[in-house]
Image (spheres, rainbow, N blue to C red):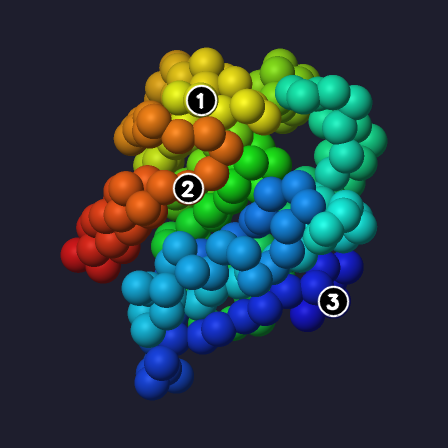
Amino acid sequence: MNTPFTFKHTQPTNMDPTKKYPAIFLLHGMGSHEDDLPQLVQEFKEQCHIFSLRGPITQHPGYAFFTIQEVGQPDRAIFDKVLVALQRFILEAIDEYQIDPHKVFVLGFSQGAVLAQSLAFVMGNLVTGIIALSGYTPKFVTEEYAIRSVDHLHAFISHGDYDYVIPSQWGMESKEIFEQFGATVTFKQYPDGHGVTPENMRDLVTFLAQQLQEEIQ
């Protein structure tokens, strides 16, 4: 693939060359890397393509997808560029690999969740579902972008009650925004800070397994 992103890809085991398969795209948080999130979706390695992307910006001790002016305010010029690049990556992956375009999921944590939610709005039915962990929806996405329908979308949005990085209220606001635009939302809160608890992981796995099963039927 012709892409600015460093990424890791695993393909379904025992692939049938006549079939197309679901795909999960993973977007890490600020200061992390492409090895951070695959553990969350280990259960789906046999049936899904899994792409874990590295943010293009060095951000100690790892990387970032975009910089911020302050919490809740991404640097718009950088954010716009990375969002376009992510759309292109997903579209090229669908074209190049054996990916079912009706089974495309994006999972992100923190700023990765911000991007997952934004991608859902700008890509419309090209994204089947999202898992957004401890993120938010930037106001300019729904107010200034040319957004597409999310009536079809199933979203899992979760947040820690004691999140010291991104306020838990922003997770609730994301839930309400997606519901206002017609998406089906599963919203969960946990007695945790800015992280993913074992219960959170179990819930997102249950959500994703259900979505994949529904898509297969």
Q: Residue shown at 60%/59% (left/top)? A: 34
Across and down, in percent, residue 81 comes to 77, 40
Who comes first in sequence, dot 2 or dot 1? 1
Label 2 residue SS: loop
Q: Is residue 11 left or right of residue 123?
A: left
Residue 174: tell me if it is visible: no
**Disc 2 crowd, CA 10 A, few/some/many (<14, 14-19, 20+):** some
Q: Which residue is mark 3?
A: 2
Q: Is 197 on the left-hand or right-hand side of 59?
A: left
Point 74% across, 20% down: residue: 70
Quadrant assignment for the N terminus: bottom right
- SS at mark 1? loop
Residue 196 seen by the camera: yes
Choose top left, top right, bottom left or bottom right for residue 187: top left
**Going 47% across and 60% down the picture, which residue do you hit?**
38
Mark 2 or 1: in front is 1
Mark 1 → mark 3, Cα distance in angstroms: 40 Å
Position in image of residue 115 (x %, y %): 59, 37
In this rendered view, identify the residue nearer to me: 208 or 90. Answer: 208
Q: Amino acid at mark 2?
A: Val
The circle on residue 162 is: 1
Q: Nearer the viewer, mark 2 or mark 3?
A: 2
In front: 39, or 26?
A: 39
Which badge, 1 or 3, comes first in the chain's sequence? 3
Quick one: label 3, few (<14), some, or many (20+) residues within 10 Å? few
Query: Where residue 211 sits in the image (x, y, percent)?
Result: 26, 48
Residue at 65% x, 20% y is: 72
Where, by quadrant of the figure, is residue 217 drawn? bottom left
- With 200 as the anchor, is 30 left or right in this view? right
| Numbered badge on residue 196 | 2
